[in-house]
Amino acid sequence: MKQQNPVKLGISVGDLNGIGCEVALKSLQDARILSSCTPIFFASTKTIAFQKQAFDLDLKFHGIKSLDRVEHGKINVLSVFEDDFEVAFGTSSAEAGRLAVASLEAATKALKEGQIDALVTAPINKSNVQSERFSFPGHTDYLAKELGGEALMFMISEGLRVGLLTDHIAVSEVSNAITTKRIRDKVKTMNQSLIQDFGIVRPRIALLGINPHSGDDGTIGSEDDTIMRPAIASLFEEGILAFGPYAADGFFGSSTYTQFDGVIAAYHDQGLVAFKTLSFGQGVNYTAGLSRVRTSPDHGTAYAIAGKGEADPSSFTQALFAAVDIYRRRTAYQALEANKLKPNQKKAAKEHNA
């Protein structure tokens, strides 16, 4: 059997005053990582050396000035910003935000150009990254602009996958943001992702209601009846196995989610409270629907424990493995699709062999 080449896996370092570098470096202590991928930090050698020393980690890394100097079997560090930043664990600063953006932009550029195969992003502070140059509410929106596609915030774990109809918007804006088009687009994105990225041939997708109890036949709002149900029905008629809307509380409380390959929540906390309760520490944030693969851990900067050596790397480790697995599945799927004979080619081949 032909041995697979290691996946070139970019890592943007996020907020250097948070736990991002700590969990990333701790994850790389797992010997399995270097056998399946070649990690590349987009940072500076001094930054990574400081973080390694701060947490007394026995790791060696290979500093490089350009991506054509990457070495497999080693932890690579590409210098993309200056070395004079003084880390102040647990604090938010504009400079930490600027460097987080510099790392993300450099890694995204490499991803777009095919210099790396997939990207894992360490957590950023959504407040201190804001500037005239970067005005996005998070990674997902920025990557959607840069990489193209119908982005879907998709939280994944061993037994649960939850996508969001709306993500980082105010609750007061949710109802108006949920349209028939948005529902159809997000469901189609999830359906395609489950097929090509997770190898599920006929995915079953559940949608959660917008209102409590999915509106109770219009008693608690009409959106579920006027928008959600017709959209689901139209998708089902097109061959997509979409079901719902389900009342979110009973859906998770009764473990109904185990009957589906994917779940779409109407808004951020409706889906993520349940997901993190059931999967925290093992969950991964995956951005489905993009032209490239990106994952991240299921937590934020965690300033409260930054610098104390207490951060659990489990979610970041899962994000690394998920990025590798998804990249390989998608590559195999695309190769299979490209090699499929078109109807006319099939007919010609049949006549030739007759």
Image (cartoon, rainbow, N blue to C red):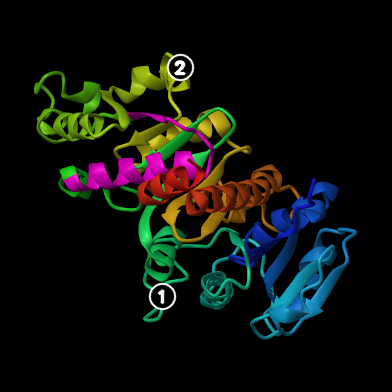
| Whole-number angstrom distance, CA of label 1 to CA of label 2 | 40 Å
Circle on res. 134: 1
Which quarter of the figure is the N terminus placed in? top right
| Front-lying residue, 185 or 225 | 185
Residue at the image point whose x is 53% and y is 71% from the top: 108
Answer with left or right where residue 287 lies relative to residue 28.
left
Magenta segment boundaries in residue numbering:
181-206
Quadrant of the rendered image containing residue 68? bottom right
Callout 1 secondary element: loop
In this rendered view, identify the residue nearer to me: 256 or 134: 256
Mark 2 or mark 1, which is nearer the start of the sequence? 1
Which residue is tagged 2?
255
Residue 166 appears in view: yes
Say which amino acid is labelled 1.
Phe
Number of the front mark, 1 or 2:
2
Q: Is residue 120 left or right of residue 21?
A: left
